[in-house]
Image (cartoon, rainbow, N blue to C red):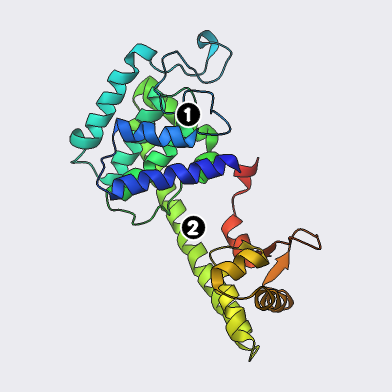
Amino acid sequence: MQEVSNYVAALSHGLKRIREGFPLSLRLIREIHEILLSRGRGSNKEPGEFRRSQNWIGGSRPGNATFVPPPPELVMECMGQLEAFLHTEARDLPLLVRAALVHVQFETIHPFLDGNGRLGRLLITFLLCAGGALSEPILYLSLYFKSNRQIYYDLLTGVCTSGNWEAWIEFFLTGVKETSGQAIVSARRLIALLDADRKKIEALGRPAASVLRVFQYAQTHPILSIAPTADKTGSTFPTVASAIDHLQRLGILHEITGRPRHRLFAYGGYMDILNEGTEPLLR
């Protein structure tokens, strides 16, 4: 939970800075990393600071590691070249290809002691938003990379060992295509679900207005409790409690704590659609 909270905060901070006109630069990358590792896993690994010691991936030491990034004295030089690529050298490349190249270069440099994978995936989103391909951060390739983990690592290694950029770019673009297609299908299913559930509520008659207000709130807060919902919707506690009772009887919400007090209710159908295919992330 802490890691997800950090991730959302880092994403929000980066997007806010970019929308204010701040360039995607080494300074902003360090700011984002500091928030990403502010608490929880990696918080003792110099958040916001480029590494001053050698790191590696796999194995117990650089000598038997799967991959050894550049030595610490070259990190600033490598990152400076990456920044130049972001701002000048890559302007003639399609945006998605630029994002693919930036991701693999960032992961190859591995400039931080921890959090490189998380930040490298965030950079894809920031690049697409800064480049105008996305108005909101709605494309996440994390699941695609996780589902194809070994291929992902093999292709990153292939770029470093044999310069096989083409295979990496093809893999990356395939991920964008598949992830986008899945998002469209999920969006259409969500719209259909919301329409069907709204019709169930409208058939209630007189209570429908207050129930629809809570239903609208549930679409942005699919796990909710009575008191905060009352506060956010401007309704009374009894009104919200009654609306949630109606939503439970209609099979739209269900209680998930089993407690008599401080109960939580989930919009199950909505969350089921969002969670489909995420099993690899839970392993």
On screen, 44 above or below 36? above
Q: Are marks 2 and 1 in contact (CB under 8 Å)?
A: no
Quadrant hosting residue 195: bottom right
Residue at 33 percent of width and 57 percent of height: 135
| Secondary structure under the numbered disc 2 in the rendered image | helix
The answer, for residue 218, to whether it is visible in the render is no
Dot 2 or dot 1, earlier in sequence: 1
Q: Amino acid at mark 2?
A: Gln
User: Which residue is rendered at x = 72% and y = 76% of the image?
Assistant: 245
Q: Residue furthest bottom?
A: 205
Q: Is 270 displayed left or right of 78 in the figure?
A: right
Question: 11 or 104, which lies in front?
Answer: 11
| Callout 2 crowding tier (Cα within 10 Å): few <14, some 14–19, many ≥20 | few
Mark in the foreground, 2 or 1: 2
Quadrant placement of the C terminus: top right
Q: Position of residue 50 (x, y in %)?
A: 39, 22
Q: Which mark is residue 154?
A: 1
Judge by depth and name the residue closer to the eye, 172 or 224: 224
Indicate the position of residue 174 as horizontal and vertical percent values: 41, 46
Bin the neighbour count of mark 1 within 10 Å (Cα to Cα): few under 14, some 14-19, many 20 and up.
few
**Taking 92 as reference, is 269 above or below it?**
below
Q: Identify residue type, mark 1.
A: Asp
Element class at badge 1: helix
Give the alpha-carbon distance from disc 2 to disc 1, as whole Å. Answer: 25 Å
Residue for badge 2: 182
Q: Quadrant of residue 85?
A: top left
Residue 160 screen position, x and y as percent:
38, 22
